[in-house]
Image (cartoon, helix red, strand yellow):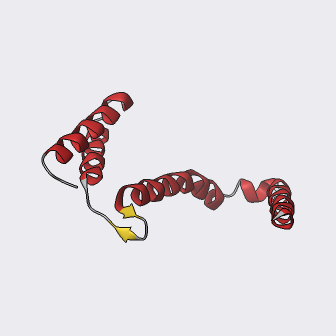
Amino acid sequence: MWLGVIVACVGCYALKYAGMSVPQRVLDSPAVRQLSLLLPVGLLAALAAAQTLADGERLMFDARIVGVLVAIIAIRLKCPFIVVVALAAASAAVARLLGMP
């Protein structure tokens, strides 16, 4: 186990060092800038989809999908964040009260 921890530490340090060694002209390229803008959005969307639709190794369509759909509509209507969260939670609760798993 300690060997794995040490290898992971060395790998993380090497990755961080490699990232800091990238020349500035590479970081200033339009493709890298565009990628750095879109990558967090893609990762968060994938995380939200996995947490909403996955149950272990299976796809699951339950009340959480109603909450996400209501949150998407609220975001499109430019509601404040706390309102988006409250609407999503309330809609998922109502869906569960109506018998959705």
Q: Residue furthest left?
A: 98
Image quarter in which the N terminus is found: bottom right
Give left or right: position of 12 versus 89. right
Q: How many marks?
A: 0
Q: Could you say which is closer to the camera, residue 79 or residue 60?
A: 60
Coordinates of residue 37 in the picture (x, y in percent): 56, 51
Q: Residue at x 27, y 46 (%)?
A: 67
Give left or right: position of 34 versus 44. right
Compared to residue 20, the image places residue 73 above or below, namely above
Give left or right: position of 54 versus 95. right
**Among the 4 quarters of the image, the one containing residue 90:** top left
Coordinates of residue 85 in the picture (x, y in percent): 34, 35
Coordinates of residue 91 in the picture (x, y in percent): 22, 41
**Among the 4 quarters of the image, the one containing residue 3:** bottom right
Coordinates of residue 30 in the picture (x, y in percent): 63, 57
Image quarter in which the C terminus is found: bottom left
Q: Residue at x 25, y 57 (%)?
A: 62
Compared to residue 59, the image places residue 47 above or below, namely above
Q: Could you say which is closer to the camera, residue 23 or residue 45?
A: 45
Q: Residue furthest bottom?
A: 57
Q: Could you say which is closer to the camera, residue 100 or residue 39?
A: 100
Q: Residue at x 14, y 51 (%)?
A: 99
**Among the 4 quarters of the image, the one containing residue 54:** bottom left
Q: Could you say which is closer to the camera, residue 15 or residue 59?
A: 59
